[in-house]
Image (cartoon, grey):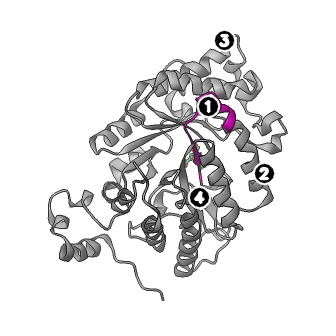
Amino acid sequence: MTQREPNRRETLLGLAAVGATACLPGAATADIDSLKARAERKGLLFGCAVTSRELRSEPALREAVLRDCNALVATNEMKWGVIEPARGRRVYAGADWLVDFATEHRLTMRGHTAVWHQNPPLWVPNALREPGGRALLEEHVRAVVGRYRGRIAQWDVVNEAIFHKDRQPGALRNSPFLQAFGEGYIADAFRVAREADPTAKLYYNDFAFESSEVSHEERRRDVLPLLESLRRQNLVDGIGLQAHLQVGDPFDPRRYRRFLSDLADIGLDIMLTEFDVADRRLEADTAARDRKVADYARAYLDVALDESAVKGLLTWGLSDRNTWLNADQWRRKDGVPARPLPYDDAMDRKPLWHAIAGSLDAAPVRKA
Ligand code: 9MR
């Protein structure tokens, strides 16, 4: 048996002995032990992906978000497929709700994502090939980024555009956008986003850079020329490294640290944007699994947060009850629910929460 983590009430009671702030109204946001407080002491962002439904229907999640996060990203509600399921009728209810929530609670909001091959509405791929198809993509970027001008601090303008296995020039993914417009679609999307909100930091976001497997090594190599080119044109401000980790994947701290330095040398901000730790290869035993997930995360985060161009960490969900890793195509073979996030499904802190806390505490202070 490993020791049980203190729950929120116990933590607050513990805190009450140290600082009276924990007993005041608004204590949820004044918790000096929170991930938010730890991140802020280092000049970092910490947050998670959420949906408006989760925040509305899960009070304990809402409370944990307000206690631990100074940043939020929309899991799904800013994707094209959600915003414009039927051509010409844009629905912003969920996205508006999230931006209002972030504004009300002074959380840094991240927009996710304007251009992604996986999520255009069904009508889009054919429509892109019509005369004037390019304007459709640009109108979408202009509409969604422009709507939140000044309110969304960071945008994932283009998501997951490299995929060397598709054997296209520049290692680009053979997406409906590449097929319709060629490689220029990426720079164009950034250009439109820049015009639509000159105050937002514009990011290129992608996955599978973290391990020392050959395919990740190739992706680290492939993404640099794309970023250098966008940066030379002053179109991109940062890279989002999704950081969907999996325990058992080989990790080489030196090579990964070098990659982060290379990104920083291009002049990019770096965000870890979709952090979680898949436990698919681990035994079912909960305590052993949680410990291994936490240890793997700690080893990675200590390296990643050491680079001062890394401006923050966002987890892809806060509690195991909301992870994408329990969807049919990703779930564990033994059917046991995955535990990739800092809170369990009863909203108690897990060893992963403490690993994140430890890495935030160990991170160097960022200069303003
Ligand atoms: O977690 C998201 C899941 O709820 C959606 O069904 C899916 C498709 O829109 O997208 C998931 O989030 C993905 C993110 O947008 C981009 N990187 C990979 C994430 C996990 O699949």
Q: Is residue 196 above or below residue 354?
A: above
Q: Which of marks 3 and 1 is nearer the N terminus?
A: 1
Q: Can I make out residue 365 in this image? A: yes
Query: Residue 241: within the magenta?
Result: yes
x and y percentages locating residue 175 in the rendered image: 73, 33
Mark nearer the viewer, 2 or 1: 2
Specify the segment rendered in magenta.
228-244
Q: How crowded is mark 4: few (under 14 residues within 10 Å), some or many (20 or more)?
A: many
Q: How far apart are marks 2 and 3 (CA)?
A: 35 Å
- Point 45% across, 33% down: residue: 200
Most extreme residue toward the right is 167
Q: Mark 1 points at which residue?
A: 120
Q: Mark 3 points at which residue?
A: 132
Q: Residues within 10 Å of mark 2 (few under 14, many from 20)?
A: some
For residue 153, the mark is none
x and y percentages locating residue 37 in the rendered image: 33, 60
Question: Type of residue at label 1?
Answer: Pro
Q: Earlier in the sequence, mark 2 or mark 4?
A: 2
Q: Mark 4 points at which residue?
A: 325
Question: Type of residue at label 3?
Answer: Gly
Question: Type of residue at label 2?
Answer: Glu
Q: How far apart are marks 4 and 1 (CA)?
A: 22 Å
- Cβ of mark 2 under 8 Å from ligand 1: the answer is no
- Cβ of mark 4 under 8 Å from ligand 1: the answer is no
x and y percentages locating residue 180 in the rendered image: 74, 22
Q: Earlier in the sequence, mark 2 or mark 1?
A: 1
- Point 63% across, 27% down: residue: 233
Q: Name the residue under label 2.
A: 218
Most extreme residue toward the top is 131
